[in-house]
Image (cartoon, rainbow, N blue to C red):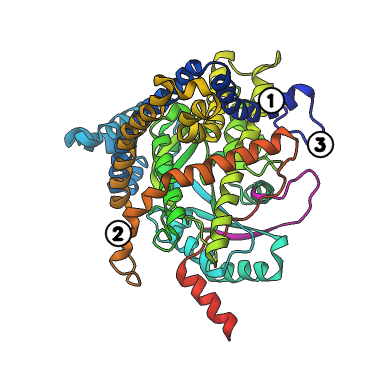
Amino acid sequence: MINLEIPLGKRTPGYRFLEMLPGILSYGAIILLVILSVVNPLLAAIYLLLVATTVLVKAVAVAYHTIKGRNKVEAAQKLDWHGLLKDLESPEEAYVRWQNAPQKDIAWHGENLRLVSSSVEPFPVPSTIYNTVIIATYNEAYEILEETIKTVQEGTYDNKQLIIVLAYEARGGEETKHTAERLKKKFADVFYAFETVEHPADLPGEVVGKGGNVTHAGRFLKTWLAKKDINFQDVIVTTLDSDNRPHATYFDYVTYEYIVHDNRKHLSYQPVSLFLNNIWDVPAPMRVIATGNSFWNIISAMRPHTLRNFASHSQPMDALVEMDFWSTRTIVEDGHQYWRSWFYFGGNYDVVPIFVPIYQDAVLSDTYGKTLKAQFVQLRRWAYGASDVPYVGTRVFSRSRNVPLWAGLLRFIRLLDGHVTLACIPILITFGGYIPQLLNYEAARSVAANQLPEVLGIMQRIAMVGLIITVFLAFKMLPARPARYKRRRTLGMLLQWILMPVTALTYSSASAFYSQTRLLFARYMEKFDVTDKATKIAIDRTKQKKKR
């Protein structure tokens, strides 16, 4: 059996080196500029121009994928996925109908009907598939969880083929347990089943995080399905956070993709996470970050070869059972699940993009200061995905590796580059052009060094085209403005984008350096800090209760 676990306690020298590598490279990129500025300002200028050129090329690619991805998401939301899924119940009959009245805009559906109906190997049919939704909660309010469950209920998928597992933490106390019981009582007859599972605190070998909670629920589900005589290969498992709102067609869409792929056990399904639920309520810096993260998820969906599991995703139950579900030793169990699955299946594993959204909350706490802090806490947890660098590296560079070397090397480089870029590029682009002049007297009199900030500024302005596209598309994606806000709030939605350089430095770069520094000095993050997410209405309601 392949060892899928992240080490706890003392690491091997090789593992420790790879843990330190992101921090070494991120700090090293800035230190290198300082050294070159002192020794040879011309080399420093060339170095910065190479960095800026790379950023410019990526900005063009980002703009292209943003436009194309947004259009794809919009088109996918208009499709009748419930009807398309229903065709797979009797694919032969549906294919005959298709031949008589083909639809060019979804020609891929006709091809899927042809392949399924003519296949020698049996394909599953929709009526035999159950979708299980594991909703992880710590101490979130009843109203937040209720809205999530109602969103699932009101979707187009048959509720009698939905199994809800509410996974709550014992650490949440009696109030959380009471909330779970209330929800079960309300929704018990709505779905095929509604189960609640309490995750005990301080289980050995677990860090305090979501991974232990959903894995405990998954093990419960394994036993429960066996008692119900439901085959694992007939179950798709989706994990949701307490504030997630799946698009109405999400489960039909996922089930459709599950059926038409014959390699279904080795696939997972990744929706587009959009942080728009409460976007009108949150402060401007949080709006910029939430919108930027939303568009990054759209862009990622357009590049399946680099797509990784993030936040909510779906995976077949039989695969999860074999792998013993998710890691209980990391606070970033979602992104880590990609690597866990990829190595378990010896490289025969892919993530299928699902081009409909799961809506999530942007960060919001009960005060402005707490909100700013909570946003950093969330981003530093995401940035701790750098802890996957040694996990991947030690397996790819091992003589006993079970994945192709070239494929593993490319993935390792992309993973490492992503975390290093997140940390150092904003600093290099923003301040790098002034470093040679400040540190070298000769450079201060050099025409090349004096023109460097101007050249970088021109390249940044060209790259701003991507930002303009983002702003335009962001306005089109916004939910309707709540009646409690006046029209001037819309103006704020436009002016907020002047904060983007600030958020890139104070949040994205700083959180990446924070997490990489922790890894550099073996100060491991072993606790999942729950992010504050709410709406203004919920916060106001809480304040009113406290006054009574």
Question: Residue flagged by tag 1: what amino acid is it?
Answer: Leu
Nearest-to-viewer mark from 1 and 2:
2
Q: Residue at x 38, y 33 (%)?
A: 302
Residue lying furthest bottom: 548
Q: Which residue is mark 2?
A: 491
Magenta stretch: includes residue 193 = yes
Residue 480 image label: none
Q: Is residue 462 left or right of residue 220?
A: left
Nearer to me, 330 or 415: 415
Could you say where residue 434 lies in the image, as x and y percent from the top left?
Answer: 47, 31
What SS does tag 1 mark?
helix
> What amino acid is labelled 2 in the image?
Leu
For label 3, the residue is 9
- Which residue corresponds to the image point at 28% horizontal and 38% vertical from the top-left? 94
Residue 47 horizontal/vertical position (percent) = 48, 19
Distance of mark 2 from mark 3, alpha carbons?
51 Å
Q: Which mark is residue 18?
A: 1
Confirm whether residue 518 shows in the render. yes
Q: Do the residues bearing badges 2 and 3 touch, measured as CB atoms within 8 Å?
A: no
Q: Which residues make up the magenta segment?
A: 192-210
Three-letter amino acid code of the residue under disc 3: Gly
**Circles 1, 2 touching at the beta carbon (< 8 Å):** no
The answer to whether the residue labelled 1 contacts the one labelled 3, judged by CB atoms less than 8 Å apart, is no
Q: Considering the numbered disc 2 on the image, is that residue within a helix, a strand or a loop?
A: helix
Mark 1 or mark 3, which is nearer to you? 1
For the C terminus, give its image quadrant.
Answer: bottom right
Q: Earlier in the sequence, mark 1 or mark 2?
A: 1
